Structures are given as C-alpha cells and as structure tokens.
Image: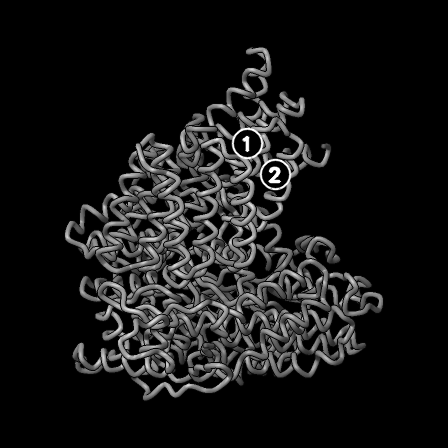
Amino acid sequence: MRFGVLGPLRAELAGRTVGLGGLRQRAVLAVLLIARGRMVSAERITSQVWEGSPPSSPTTLHACISQLRRALEPERSPGAPPRLLVREGTGYALRTDPSAVDAERFADLAVAGRHALDSGRPGPAAELLTEALDLWRGPAYADFDGAGFAFTEAARLEDLRAAAYEDRLAATIDLGRHAAAVGELEALVAEQPLRERGWELLVLALYRSGRQADAIAALRTVRQRLADELGIDPGLALRDLESAVLAQDPRLDPPPARSAGTIGAHAGGATPATTRPRTAPVVPAQRSATPVGNLPFALSSLVGRTDDIAAVDRLLAEYRLVTLTGPGGVGKTRLALETARGRTDSADGPWLVELAGLTSPELLPATIGAALGIPGVSSAEDLAAVLAGRRLLLVLDNCEHLVDEVTTLTGVLLSRCGGLRVLSTSREALGVEGEAVYEVRPLDPDGDGTELFRKRAAAVLPAWSPDLDDLDRIPGLCAGLDGIPLAIELAAAQCRMLSIGQIADALENRFDVLVDGPLDLPARHRALESAIAWSHRLLEPEERRLFHRLSVFAAGFDLDAAGAVGGQTSVLPPLSALVRKSLVGVEPGTAPRRYRLLETLRQYALRELDSDDLARTQQRHRAWVLAQAESAERRLHGPQAAVLLGRLTREQPEFRAAFASALAAGDGDYALRLGGALYWFWYRMGHIAEGLSWMSKAFAAAPHAEPAVRARARLAVSGLSYLAGKPAQAYEAVVLAEQEAREAGDLMVEASARVYQTHFGVLAGIPVDAPALARSAVELARRAGEDWLVAEALMVQGMLARVLGDLPTAATVLAEAVATADSCGHDWAAGSAAWAAMKTACDHGDGRRALEIAAGILDALDRHQDVTSRLVLIHTAAHALVLTGQAEQAAVLMGGVEAVGRRVGFSPELMDPLDGPREAAAVREALPQDKYERLVARGRELSLAELTTLLVGLLKIR
C-alpha cells in the first residue's frame, strides 16, 4: 500500500488506485497520514475534519473509518482485526511504513540531495533531487486547500519543495550547465520573487553564460522588488554577489568542465563570503572650509556610525535619492546630518528641512522653500523652477507622516533639477523611482551601545566612575534596550537618580523610566513612549491590529506564523506595511524571510492589545506552536533530525511563551501535550532543567489529564530525569508512562516506555528480570512498526548484555541496532549503540578500537548540536585515551566535560552510574594528583566546541 499526498490525496494497492470515498472520508485519512503513525483521538479527528461545521456524531466517523478499512485492506476477512487503520485507545492510527508515503520519500531524497550538493558531488545531487521533485503531482494535500488541519504540514512540504528545486538548479549550475539553468531560474523568480536564493542562482547562471549585463539587470530587479514589497535591501549574499559581478571577480568564472560524478564546488549561491572580493571602504570627504546651507552644529559627540556614514555617502554618490529608514529613536536624523556635513559636492547647501512639525500637507512646497530661503513658493513646479540651475543636497527629515506628498514632490524635483540630490529620513521608504533605501540598524550593545551609554552618563554625572559590576551590566542593559540610541541616552540620563542595576531591573516598565529627555529636543524624542507613539498613530487599522497581535511572539516569526497567529484574512499587505514603516524588522539572510519586533516595540504593542484580543491571540499562538512541535516531533528520529533540531532551537522562545501563557490560562493539558512533543528536542539539546521545570508545572496544572496525554508527558519526565542523574525517578515515571499508554491504547508510547524500563531499572538498582523485559521491549517495538524504536530497543538490549558480562551477545545485538538505525536514518540510536560498543572495547582493554569507534560517532554528531551525546562520548573517549597511554590529554577532556556539563545541568557520571564513575577513576588514577588537578583545571577553561576540536586532533594523531 502506497499513499500520495504531494498533490490530490491518493492510495495505491499493488499499483492500482484505491477509491477513498468523499471529501470528508479522505480528510479523515489525511489527518491520520499527517499524524505519521501516531494515535489521533476520535474527538480530535472530528474537530479537524468537520471544522466550522455542526459537530459530527461518533457514528459518522465510525462509518468513515469502516469504509476506509474496506478500501485499504480489501483482502481482510470479515471479523479479522485490521492491520493498517487500527483502533488505539480513544482514537485511531494508520500503521504504515514511512517510505510508503510519498512526502516521506521526498523529504529523505531532498535531504540526501542537499548533503551530496554540500559535499561537492553535484551529479548525484542532481539525480537525487530530480527523483525527489518527480514525486510531486500538484500542491501538497491539494484536496484540502484552506483546511486548518493540513495548513502547517502543506506549508512545510511546499517550503521543502522550493528548497529542493533551488538545490537541483544549483547542482545544474555546478555541473557547468549554466545556460540550461537560466530559463528555469527565470520562471522560478517570476513565481517566487521574494526568495533570494533563486535570484542568486539566476545571477550566477547568467554571469557564467557570458551575460553580465543581464546578471546586473537581474540584481537591480530583485533590489527594486524587495524594496517595493517589503521595504528592505537584499541580504548579504546578494549584495556580495552584486559586488563580485560588477568587479568581474574571476572567482565567479565557471569551474573547469566536470562530469556528473566529479567533485566540485557547491554552486548554491555566489562565491562564499570568505572569498568574495571586498570593496575598499569609502572615507567621507572632508568638510568644506566655507560651509553653506543651514545644517545645525552638533551639540554632542557622535558615537560609532563610521561604517554607516561611509555607506550612505557611497549611495549618495550613485543615487540621487537616498532614504534612511528605521524605527523611532534609532538615529536616522543624526546619521543624515553627519553624512551631509561631510559632503563637499554641492555648490550650495546642504539644506535641512524639518518636517515633523508640518501637519498641513499643502504647505510642503512652502516649507521647503522657506528653509532654502525662497519665499513665495506655493507648488512643486514653482520650487523646481527655482532649483533647476542649482547643485545642492536637500535633507528632508521625518517624512513618514507625509509620505504620499513627499513622494510626489520629490519625484517632480528630481525629474526637473539635474543637480539636486535628496537625503531623506522616514520610518518607511518613499517609493520614488530610483530611490536607494538604507536601513539604519541599532547600535551593537557590546560596542558602540556601551560606549554611548558611558559617554552620556558621564555628561550628566561628571564625577561618575563605574565599578566593575556596572561595567559588566551596561552591555546587557543596552541589549535590553535593543541598541536604540534614543533609549540608551534616556537610560543614561537616569543615572542622576538610579543605579545601573535599578535601571536594568526597571526595563519591564521601560516607558515609565525612559523619560525626561533634553528640553530642546522635539517632544517625541523626550520619552521613549512618545517616539513609538508617533509611528503608531500613522498606522492603518489593519496594520495596527496586526502590530498588536504580533507582540505575542517572543522572538522571530515567518509569514505563515504571522498568518496563523494574526487572525486576519490576508496578512501580507499589513505585514509588508509594518516592515516598510520600520515597526517590524526583517532578519537578514533568512529564507523564507523571518521577521522580528524589537523588544521595546513588542512591549509597546503588547500593552496596546486589549485583554480579550490578547487571550484569543495567545490561543492562536499556542495552537500554532503545538502544530510546529508535533509536526517536527514525528520526524526527529529520522534523517531530517539535524535540520529539525535547528528549527526547533530557533523557535524555542515561542515554546517558552506558549508554556507560560497556557499555564497562566490554566490550560495544563496543553502544557502536557506541548511537553510531550518537545521531549526529544529537550533530550537531544540538553535542556534538562528547563524541560523538567515545565513538566512539573504542567502536571500540577492538569491533575486529571487523559491517560494518552499523561503518558507522553511522563516519557519526557522519565528521559530528562535519566539525563539529570536521577535513575530512580526516571524508572518510576517510565513505569507510569507504560501503564497510562496501555490504558489509552497508545502502542507507540507503550513500546517506548517498555524499552527504557530495562535500562532505567538496572541503573536504579531496581530488582527486575532485565533480560526478559528487554526481549519483550524489542517484540513490542516491532509490533509498533517503527524502525527507529526497534533500533533503540536493540540498543538497550545490547547495553544490558554488556552489563551482564555477555560481551559476544552484546556485540551482535549492538551491531544489529546500528544497522537498523542506519537503515532509517536514526543517527542518535546508531551513535548510542556505537558508544556502547566503545565501552565494550574498553572492557577488553582495547583503547585503540574504542577511539576508532569514537571517530565514527563524531562524524555523525557533526550534523547535530546534541550536547549530552557529545559529552558522554568525550567522557568515554578519555577512558580510551588512558588505555592508549594518553592520560594527560584525557585529564584535560575530563575537566572540560565537567565544566560544560555543569553549565547545562548534566553529568555523565550521574547519568551513567555503572560506567561513568569507573571511567573518571581510570583517568584520575593514571596521573599524580597535583598533575591531574592542574590538567583538569586547564580543561575547565574550554568550550564544548574546543573540546570537540581537541578530541578530533587526538583521534587524527592516533
């Protein structure tokens, strides 16, 4: 039986299409396919399939299930138990091999293709990626467009499809078929104009095809498109590629001709950033000896911004209109003035026109005329007639509330006055043809931000001499203020009344603290709240509503997340407006694009969100978070684990926010479900204390949760307790998890719990029939039908055989565990089984063999950021080094493991009480005590990355 979801839903039995019935019935099957073998409660199936319709009766769902069973298992005898669509507890599960679903085959092929591409093998990469893309027959879950239950999964698959298509075109370019790739790439960027990687590949293909002019035209097109639709500049990769194309950098030339199997450089974009040519910095011109114009003298020293001034100066040399954008208080006006002061290419000027106080748009020409000393001007045409023969720089400050009028007037002036250049500041771009937009970024909190705070604090307290504690806290304070110069200066001014610590502690109520700016400044710059309110008032109702709702995100989010949480029919127009108006920032270099609110803006927006809307928005946020976690959790034991762990790490602030809001709302059941979905992420990434803390609060808030929910959450408590060095608590939790899973009919959780009862029971010294329990765990795992779980069961069985002294059986079973894990891409199980084999080699005194195994495990770990696995590997490798006569290096490693483990709440000796203390003792006893302590102290200074590098070097030496 095979299933297809990459297009309209379909099923094939022995190559023949199976009739799946009507839309509701197919939707039931789709919900079960998305669950990827997990049990889905009948209540949940009904709520998702009949979403927005009157509740369906249990009889209706049962009828759908019965008809699907007849269609999927036509050979099943009447009364025989179903093998494919099975009843489990309060729900149903689809027991099918992942490879039977085209989406799973596609994802595995895409990962393999990308790995081949990154490894410099474009020929195999192209074959794998072509095979992956050929599986698609239309949009993912095409029958269910707009259905809530399919939205997240379909969006995930479509994003993977776009990335695989780009990878396949990158392989085509890398094989030297540049011209062949151009046509497909032109169609790709037309269809997905905001994905920058497609443009990078198109520019590279055009350039390598000898079409440099077309490559430059493509770069200009994408720059204009991003500015028009998102109000942003291209990412770093595109900007570097543009510089390389303009310089005709020889590193962009096609590589030597190669065959499909030849190893070559990855052409996934432009020349790597480390080898791209860099343009020489432009030094601002010296100030004119006889200044003209009306620029005010600076009243305080400028801190930082040297690179910004040079960049804006370069833009003014190339473009006649440059607009500085950014949130309120970021320093746009100061940067514009400092840049204008340094220019000497104007015969008169620079001239500053301050527009913040102008509330009557019809007076705009007269206001500019008055600033330039041209009385009587009443229209853009009058102003253009006077300026037509002059060569000057015009600085238009604070244009955001008059964008339409400034755009029209600037267009007229630039088209009629050839000697005019305009430098404007605005919280959004003007949108004039030929405009260059420069986003003014906040200051680096650790660098210029700290220096600005210290200078402004010294100005209000000349005798101020910060102590070491103050110096340590200032960078964190500036980071909490998002590096916004206005906020930093207002905070520094509070040093007259408050200590650094008091100011930092008051940031939760920053709008009450960051007030009382200099009286000579405009009112909007005397308090942080006023600066933001200025922008807030200019928003349209839909934009304001979305701005408020986006404040529930704790960190970054993408377009799909904004749509799911924003609760608005179309989120792109208001989100684009918020980006243009500098209230939402774009995270550079992200594809798909990710967005973020500065913390100061987030707090303002959150405060403006009324309580009812806040509760509804948080509920949507929690639903989106849970969908993300559950979608990833189903794939964390396979070849996509490394990518998914990285994605979950990026979303971790959202998980924390969802936990907090759920517990505040009294929704303990939700917290248990989310914790159950995040368990393996917490386990792999070493978030031990955090996971246990959330689970403790969740269980306290949901004392009467259903067994299915409790069982999965209990697994999380068990595994994390094991990592925390508490095997007795781990055993108690895993026993309860099996009982609750059996009560709920959740075979997968029941099998997972059985697998680890053996291991935790032995570690805790619980009297159990370990061999029988381990055998039954393997049998139960095989019944569950998941190869990754079988691999883990065999791994535990092999570990037990070693502990019981049956080394030949241990070697055989562990080898089977590794083979099973490798077959399904479960790197962790393969590595853990190999780690047990390392210990077996040490038992034989064969340190060299143990280190050979360690080298293989390290290769796999390089694809993951698994902290705990890396620490236990280094701990055991230290024992192996002692066996090979390298006790000094072993002691350094032990010191590092101890220090890094303490930072994440993990100890290999506590987690592994049978072998961990013995390994530590072997290293300690191999050296004189004073020498051992000295070497361990040296190791404590190393980071995890440095420890890994040290071990890699030792393995190479060996």
Whether pointer 2 and pointer 1 mark residues with C-beta atoms closer than 8 Å, the reply is: yes
Identified at 67% across, 72% down, the residue is 127
Q: Is residue 193 among what the camera can see? A: yes
Identified at 66% across, 56% down, the residue is 290
Would residue 126 be found to the left or right of residue 358 on screen?
A: right
Residue 309: x percent and y percent?
61, 55
- Secondary structure beneath dot 2 equals helix
Q: Nearer the viewer, residue 32 or 939?
A: 32
Q: Earlier in the sequence, mark 2 or mark 1?
A: 2
Around disc 1, counting alpha carbons within 10 Å, would you say few (fewer than 14), some (14 to 19), or many (20 or more)? many
Tell me, for residue 523, which label it has, or none.
none
Quadrant in the picture for residue 950: top right
Would residue 665 be found to the left or right of residue 491 on screen?
A: left
Would residue 811 be found to the left or right of residue 427 on screen?
A: right
Q: Is residue 230 among what the camera can see? A: no
Residue 254: x percent and y percent?
80, 68
Query: How many marks do you count on the picture?
Result: 2
| Quadrant of the rendering where the N terminus is positioned | bottom left
Q: Nearer the viewer, residue 768 or 43?
A: 768
Distance between mark 2 and mark 1 Cα atoms: 9 Å
Q: Which residue is mark 1?
A: 876
In the image, residue 480 above or below residue 321: above
In the image, residue 809 above or below residue 543: above
Q: Which residue is mark 2?
A: 854
Quadrant in the picture for residue 733: top left
Amino acid marked by disc 1: Thr
Q: Nearer the viewer, residue 118 or 66?
A: 66
Amino acid marked by disc 2: Ala
In the image, residue 829 above or below residue 236: above
Residue 54: x percent and y percent?
17, 82
Residue 501: x percent and y percent?
34, 34
> Which color scheme does this rendered protein use?
one colour
